[in-house]
Image (cartoon, grey):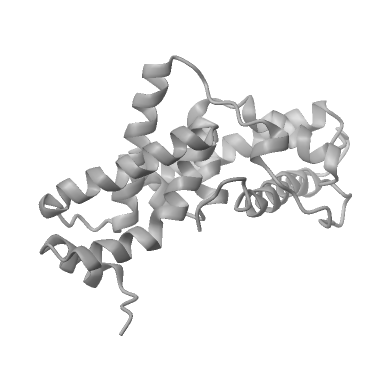
Amino acid sequence: MVEHNDDAILERAIEGDSEAFGLLYERYVGKIYNYIYYRVGNVSDAEDLTERVFLRALRHIHNYTHRGLPVSAWLYRIAHNLVANWHRDNSRRKDVPLDEGMLFSQHFNFPEQELLRSEEHNRLLEVIHKLPDERQELLILKFVDDLSNAEIGRVMGRTEGAIKSLYHRTLLAIRDELVNLAVIPENDDQEDGQKASRNGLASDALNATGADLHSAEGVND
């Protein structure tokens, strides 16, 4: 009988049940790989770091302490720390080539205008890649791995309120840059509601883009 409850599986894994740990691995390896791949930008290092995440988890799971956090937050935190060490060791920013790391559908339409045509996809990604690392990490966790603000806060060591604030500022920054690139039209005479709608467009564009990031090359399912 297949267990669907993470807590029940985790308890078995803590007690040394290797099959239970295998279930956690199968459940989360794809998402952890996605997160790491986007942060480091190449398949070889992403595969190596993903393996190290689960080896570290296996070594320390008997010391796991319940603190009201899902086991996924623990795994992402391990991945977060390993990626941070990787960047320090390599002294370089990741750079996922647009034609390698992202595959897009060409069938998104929004009421105000068609934002996600092929050229505009690339513009959006260029804007995202210019963001500070913590904002890129937030977007990866939110739109690639579908984590809630609370879960993202646990991974990044911030409160849920701080994540909401960072996300809002990130959307504004993306919107303003898209305006500068003429992807979203600017009109100073617009009412507040219309301007808020532009924020929504940026959010919609990110949401659609994030959905397609699941098909990134080399993702382990």
Q: Is residue 114 or residue 12 the one in the foreground? A: 12
Task: Look at 81% across and 56% down and name the residue there.
Answer: 108
> x%, y% of residue 131?
60, 27
Name the quadrant containing residue 79. top left
169 w.r.t. 14: above or below: above
Q: Position of residue 140 (x, y in %)?
A: 53, 43
Which residue, as the protein is rendered here, is positioned at the far bottom?
1
As drawn, which residue projects farthest toward the front? 44
Q: Quadrant of the N terminus?
A: bottom left
Q: Is residue 13 left or right of residue 85?
A: left
Residue 192 image position (x, y, % from top left): 77, 44
Residue drawn at the location 54% of the way across and 38% of the way down: 38
Q: Is residue 62 or residue 48 the one in the foreground?
A: 48
Residue at the image point whose x is 16% and y is 46% from the top: 59
109 is higher (above) or lower (below) than 124:
below
* Up/down of 67 relative to 38, above or below: below
Locate residue 64 relative to residue 185 in the image: left or right. left
The image quadrant of residue 71 is: bottom left
- The answer to whether residue 137 shows anywhere in this view is no
> Quadrant location of residue 52?
top left
Q: Position of residue 7 (x, y in %)?
A: 24, 68
Please, is residue 128 above or below residue 208 in the view?
above
Question: Is residue 131 left or right of 91 when viewed as pictured?
Answer: right
Q: Tell me: 35 left or right of 95.
A: left
How many dots with numbers? 0
Q: Is residue 139 visible?
A: yes
Residue at x 38% of width, y 25% of height: 86
